[in-house]
Image (cartoon, rainbow, N blue to C red):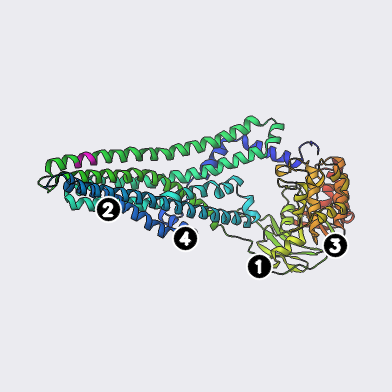
Amino acid sequence: MTDEPLSTHDELAVLEHASAFDDTTALEHELLRESEPSPKMSAVAVLRRGFAESPELGRSLRLTMLFAVIGATGRLIIPILVQQVIDKGLLADEGFRPGFTITACAGAAVIVLAVMQLARITYVRLVTAAETMLRNLRVRAFAHVHALSMADHDTTRRGELTSRVTSDIETIARFAQYGAVAWIVDTVVITGTLIVMSFYAWQLAVITMVIAIPILPLFRFMQRRQLVAYTRVRARVGTTLSEVSEAVQGAAPIRAYGLQPRARQRLEDAIQGQYRAEIGASKWFAFMFPLGDAFGGLALASVTVAGVWFGQSWGLNAGSLIACLFLVQLILGPIAELGEILDQTQTAIAGWSKVLDLLDRPIDLVEPEPGVALPAGPLGVTAEHVDFRYRTGDLVLRDVSLVIPAGASVAIVGETGSGKTTFAKLLNRLSDPVEGRVLVGGVPLDTVAPGSRAERIRMVPQDGFLFDGTLGDNIAMGRLGATAEEVRAAVTQLGLDDWVAGLPRGLDTEVGERGEGLSVGERQLVALVRAQLADPGLLILDEATSAVDPRTERSLTEALHRLAADRTMVSVAHRLSTAEQSDLVCVFDAGVLVEVGSHEELVALGGRYAELYRSWLGNTGQSVI
């Protein structure tokens, strides 16, 4: 395990990142564009669709709401019992009645305890349903992200997808645990309170409603603006996560090129954008509490004055008036709570809308059922009039037709942006052509069973991704169910026993997060052993020997020669040596396959490949294209 200089891939990534840092105005425009809310569905439509997409909530919610309504009704009995104790116990016509008073108080205590226990059961059921929904929706969203095509992943920032699966779903869970049922409970309490109050003195119920009516349009006004504000917050959260992810993953090149101030500025701009969005949303939330308090104070004062002044003419006695004051006090809680649950609801709607947008993204790569198995042995490749474009923009591949014989070694060359890597990814069905088709082993690739494709076609990227764990565990991921003996055999078959023996704990060496305990070249070696373990018929390489030290390159080159035996190998070539050693060279230029032939034939032809060849020779023969 050695420290290495930055690879050319890293350098390009840093320079692209640096150019982005230089334009803070462009970043601000990007943040503003991403934070604009999407007016696809109304709040009610989002909630209706959200509950439909999470049946776990619906199945549990009906009984839970029944419990909540019973509990809310239990609260309304307490003021009635208070009135009974005063009128028929403490101030009864025949004098104080201790037996009735004690019995009524005991009944009130039982009701309070029953309501408390019912509230506990309700909460436990809510949390269970919400956590079940959270788990299932997150798994669905995660699976959908992995089912999206290369075009979706290349045009979407990673932090946005992460935000959909994490923080956006968390907002839905908080709403499901409390807000959804709180709307029902508070509505029952408010409605029931006004009904009970009207039995004592309908005039007091009218006074309470008159005071409350102006609040309704204010709530509606704030609801609309809160939805816009919280949609902007969810978008800003995704942007911040993207910037944090990029800054953490690019820490080494950022430090190496002295880009810390620029990286810090870009991250601070994203955080500042989220801060402004959060503050903007919280202003509406902050207005809700004073509004509820103002209503509570005004309602309580108005009912007290009207009850004392007109109570006798309205048929109120001491017990009835006190019961009405208790009822007004009872209604204050739900009114004040409306601000909190409205805020929580708007946050959930914004998050739910983002998650639903993700789930609504079409899956371009529809897997066949049951699908065709690829034949054994080396696999030939045929491309027939293939066109490809990403979701926006022009075609990046145009009318590509190519036949690769089974067992051949093919180099794909071309300048950056010529479409060579895109074509290689189509061979592994990371995306489908928009026109034409690709056949592997004589079978249309879009009809191949996913399991067979994973076993028979392998793509080795330029920088193999490793998971946190041991070296042996990472190699075993090359084939599901591979044993330790098969892992060791794959290492031996590629002649890498000495390399493994030189590691601190051999196959039990911990590779660290993203394989950072190994060098770039060593991670590529692991990717090659994975491919050997899978025993594919078609091997696709993104120049596995680029940007590594000479010693590791020798190991990689030897491993590649062994790995290529009895297989079709397609290499995205960045080096002259790779093209020279291949049976066939395919030259791409601006998305068009312009030349196909052997190295010698194409040099003699004097066309596009000959120009690249002269450029290679002018740069010591080992330049990256």
Q: Which amino acid is tagged 1?
A: Pro
Q: Which one is closest to the eye, mark 3 or mark 2?
A: 2
Quarter holding residue 412: bottom right
Mark 2 surroundings: few (<14), some (14-19) or many (≥20) residues within 10 A: some
Q: Give the residue pinned by disc 3.
A: 407
What residue lies at 16% left-to-right and 42% top-to-bottom? 306
Contact, CB < 8 Å: mark 2 with mark 4?
no
Point out the image quarter for the N terminus: top right
Q: Which amino acid is tagged 2?
A: Gly
Q: Earlier in the sequence, mark 3 or mark 2?
A: 2
Q: Give the residue pinned by disc 4.
A: 52
Q: Nearer the viewer, residue 211 or 265?
A: 211
Question: Which disc, if any, is residue 368?
Answer: 1
Q: Nearer the viewer, residue 297 or 616?
A: 297
Q: Which residues are magenta?
A: 299-303
Q: Which amino acid is tagged 3?
A: Gly
SS assignment for the magenta stretch, majority? helix
Q: Where does residue 624 sit, x and y in percent of width and height?
A: 80, 44
Q: Give the residue pinned by disc 2.
A: 192
Q: Which one is closest to the eye, mark 2 or mark 1?
A: 2
Q: Nearer the viewer, residue 39 or 483?
A: 483
What residue lies at 63% left-to-right and 51% top-to-bottom? 153
Q: Earlier in the sequence, mark 4 or mark 1?
A: 4
